[in-house]
Image (spheres, grey):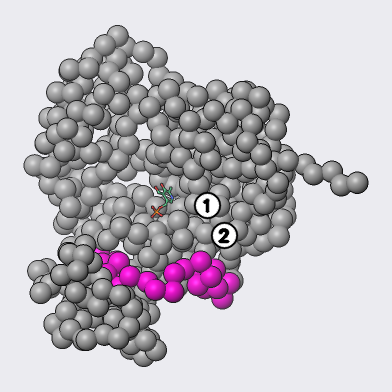
């Protein structure tokens, strides 16, 4: 029977409901079809309790989810919180539906995650792209500069919101307070996709979280940096500049009607843990990652991302100066059962969380140092990752392109045509080509470059990149 080793249930209504379900198991005539039996397909369904007729009654008469969400809202200083079992992907799309629609413009960072881009398609929003600064020394993205957003808002005075992703996938942190000021001067909300920053704001050595810095909406993946189940995410908002009813409608419209109670209960438990022990647990992890960074800094040629503008728990290293290929290093790490979040030829990204210890980081760093030594070669120049440098040429709105007639054409012959699909090297899942954008020589080169660097080409109809799906203009008569 599941237990509560850290005694969190008193402050975590959904966790308490999940534990009670196991303490007094019902004989359900409801879904899910496994009926809590683990003798049919095994432990793969263990702990799977639905919200409806599980953590709460089918009529949601106890309001246990709302109580848990209210606690999270209070912790993050929000006036609105919803838990999601569909990841930050669902959360981003729900927010997009809440902002505006039908051709309305929004200012969006071009390094957005593809989930938000599909949110633009769902809502019919027209992006006004802004680019983050790219650090010349590392080729990695910094934040979007507030003045870049100001210029975009001046040029597009009818824009209804500003959306950025911060921190970046590699852990760089932008000027969210400056972005909030820029958006608010224009009277529009700032939405921050903080998928990687559920831990921000809970230790003095971590950056404040987006709401503390003035953002109106913050989306975050509890499963990424907190000890929560995969797919657990939160939408947190201060709704003064947003229509709360519309945000709620967006959340419900895109959510499953059968949310996994274990995912929700783990979000609640992670929130309770963060509130009670976050400072202590995060402090331990920050010290361990600091020690890891210091060891890696001694490796000749290796650049370790560090400093005030970097998430202390994201361990991002750049390999060009070592001559080693990150794909070969990843193979060694996988053989040692030490998978990392991302590895391509030049960059390796490892995520540390409050679940890590000095021992877990020691093991990773030891294996990484050994692998770099094994694969060391002639240093090569830093080449910025393609997703951060591509200059989009917008031919039609993402939604129009998504629903347009389409055909597959050889990539080399597609230059000048309008892409009907989204193609993103993954990780980080930032589109090089989005629906409605023109295929240019630059995008073709960027996609080939990503593939040659060993990055998986995701979401493309043809991941080999032999062909690309473009729109077809139908002439009638
Ligand atoms: C910036 C960003 N936003 C959103 C997402 C989607 O998150 P989830 O996997 O929780 O749906 C990701 C996933 O990697 C991401 O990197």
At 36% from the left and 40% from the top, the residue drawn is 171
Q: Which residue is mark 1?
A: 116
Q: Secondary structure at mark 1?
A: helix
- Check mark 2 vs ligand 1: CB closer than 8 Å? yes or no: no
Q: Residues within 10 Å of mark 1 (few under 14, many from 20)?
A: many
Image vertical order of residue 260 relative to residue 280, above or below: below
At 34% from the left and 62% from the top, the residue drawn is 232
Q: Are marks 2 and 1 in contact (CB under 8 Å)?
A: yes
- The percent coordinates of residue 364 (x first, y second) are 16, 35
Q: CA distance from mark 2 to mark 1?
A: 7 Å
Left/right placement of residue 367 relative to residue 244 reads left
Q: Main secondary structure of the magenta part?
A: helix
Is residue 200 visible in the rendered structure shown here? no
Q: Nearer the viewer, residue 414 or 383?
A: 414
- The percent coordinates of residue 37 (x first, y second) are 19, 74
Give the numbered dot on residue 96: 2
Left/right placement of residue 366 relative to residue 89 reads left
Magenta residues span 245-270
């Amino acid at each position: 029977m599941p237990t509560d080793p850290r005694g969190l249930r008193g402050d975590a209504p959904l966790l308490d409901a999940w534990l009670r379900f196991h303490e007094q198991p019902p004989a359900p005539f409801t879904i899910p079809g496994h009926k809590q039996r683990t003798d049919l397909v095994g432990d793969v369904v263990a702990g799977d309790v639905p919200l409806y007729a599980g953590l709460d009654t089918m009529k949601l008469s106890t309001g246990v989810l709302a109580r848990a969400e209210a606690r999270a809202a209070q912790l993050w200083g929000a006036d609105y919180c919803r838990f999601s079992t569909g990841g930050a992907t669902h959360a981003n799309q729900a927010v997009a539906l809440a902002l505006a629609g039908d051709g309305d413009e929004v200012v969006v960072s071009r390094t957005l995650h593809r989930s938000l881009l599909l949110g633009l398609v769902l809502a019919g929003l027209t992006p006004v792209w802004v680019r983050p600064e790219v650090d010349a020394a590392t080729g990695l993205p910094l934040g979007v500069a507030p003045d870049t957003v100001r210029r975009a808002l001046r040029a597009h005075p009818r824009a209804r919101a500003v959306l950025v992703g911060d921190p970046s996938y590699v852990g760089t942190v932008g000027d969210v307070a400056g972005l909030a000021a820029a958006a608010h001067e224009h009277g529009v909300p700032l939405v921050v996709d903080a998928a990687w920053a559920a831990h921000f704001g809970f230790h003095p050595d971590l950056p404040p979280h987006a709401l503390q810095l003035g953002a109106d909406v913050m989306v975050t993946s509890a499963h990424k940096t907190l000890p929560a189940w995969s797919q657990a995410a939160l939408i947190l908002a201060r709704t003064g500049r947003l229509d709360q009813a519309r945000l709620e409608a967006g959340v419900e419209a895109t959510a499953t009607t059968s949310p996994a109670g274990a995912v929700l209960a783990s979000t609640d438990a992670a929130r309770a843990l963060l509130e009670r022990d976050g400072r202590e647990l995060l402090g331990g992890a920050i010290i361990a990652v600091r020690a890891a960074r210091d060891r890696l800094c001694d490796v000749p040629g290796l650049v370790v991302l560090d400093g005030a503008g970097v998430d202390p728990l994201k361990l991002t290293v750049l390999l060009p100066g070592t001559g080693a290929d990150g794909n070969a290093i990843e193979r060694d790490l996988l053989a040692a059962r030490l998978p990392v979040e991302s590895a391509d030829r030049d960059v390796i990204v490892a995520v540390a969380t409050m679940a890590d210890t000095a021992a877990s980081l020691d093991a990773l760093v030891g294996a990484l140092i050994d692998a770099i030594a094994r694969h060391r070669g002639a240093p090569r120049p830093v080449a910025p990752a393609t997703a951060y440098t591509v200059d989009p040429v917008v031919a039609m709105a993402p939604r129009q392109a998504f629903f347009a007639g389409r055909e597959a054409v050889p990539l080399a012959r597609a230059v000048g045509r309008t892409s009907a699909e989204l193609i993103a090297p993954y990780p980080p899942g930032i589109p090089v080509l989005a629906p409605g954008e023109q295929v240019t020589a630059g995008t073709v080169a960027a996609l080939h470059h990503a593939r040659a660097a060993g990055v998986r080409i995701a979401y493309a109809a043809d991941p080999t990149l032999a062909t690309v799906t473009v729109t077809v203009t139908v002439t009638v008569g």
